Amino acid sequence: MRRVHTLRFVGSMAAAMALAIGAIGCGSTSSAVTHTVQVLTPAQEAAKTRAALAKRYLKIVAPYNKVGDAVGSGPLSSTNTAGRAWINAAEIFANHALRLGATGQVEADIRALVRASTKMIAAIENVDSAAYTNAAYEANGAANVVRADLGLPPPPH
């Protein structure tokens, strides 16, 4: 439910004079200016904030996902081009995600996603495919939680 308050202000000194003259019987009218101020309920404000966070999240995760899609299922290591590109994208994503401006549970869930992504980086750098697989499952689950927090559907697979 949206509450709207209307405030009336006299538009100018001339209008104020016309109002004063009209008050003493000269028959003049005023031209009042109406300003509408929208007051959001806490739930509306939270939804607006969540939508803004979701928009920023999608913007910062897009390059990370694009690199991940390009890498595919090929071998990853910190010495090959694909692995290095993925590590760089993951680090950039983590840096931006932590500065997203989320609070409370959303912030905690974003931190969990960044931790899982960091585990994936370590697994690539150590050429540990089992650790990478585990971290990837953890990261996918954490990403789904963050997306749900932000009102986004799960990513297409």
Image (cartoon, rainbow, N blue to C red):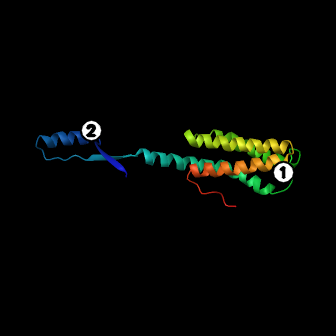
Residue at 61% over, 48% down: 146
- For the residues bearing labels 1 and 2, Cβ distance under 8 angstroms: no
Q: Position of residue 75 (x, y in %)?
A: 87, 53
Residue at 85% over, 50% down: 76
- Whether residue 104 is situated above or below residue 147 in the rendered picture: above
Q: Which element carries disc 2, helix, strand or loop?
A: helix
Q: Position of residue 74 (x, y in %)?
A: 85, 56
Q: Marks 1/2: CA distance?
A: 69 Å
- Identify the disc placed on residue 13: 2
Q: Quadrant of the C terminus?
A: bottom right
Circle 1 sits on which residue?
82
Q: Is residue 154 visible?
A: yes
The kind of residue tagged 1 is Ala
Residue at 17% over, 39% down: 20
Q: Which element carries disc 1, helix, strand or loop?
A: helix
- Identify the disc placed on residue 133: none
The kind of residue tagged 2 is Met
Q: Residue furthest left?
A: 25
Foreground: 38 or 76? 76
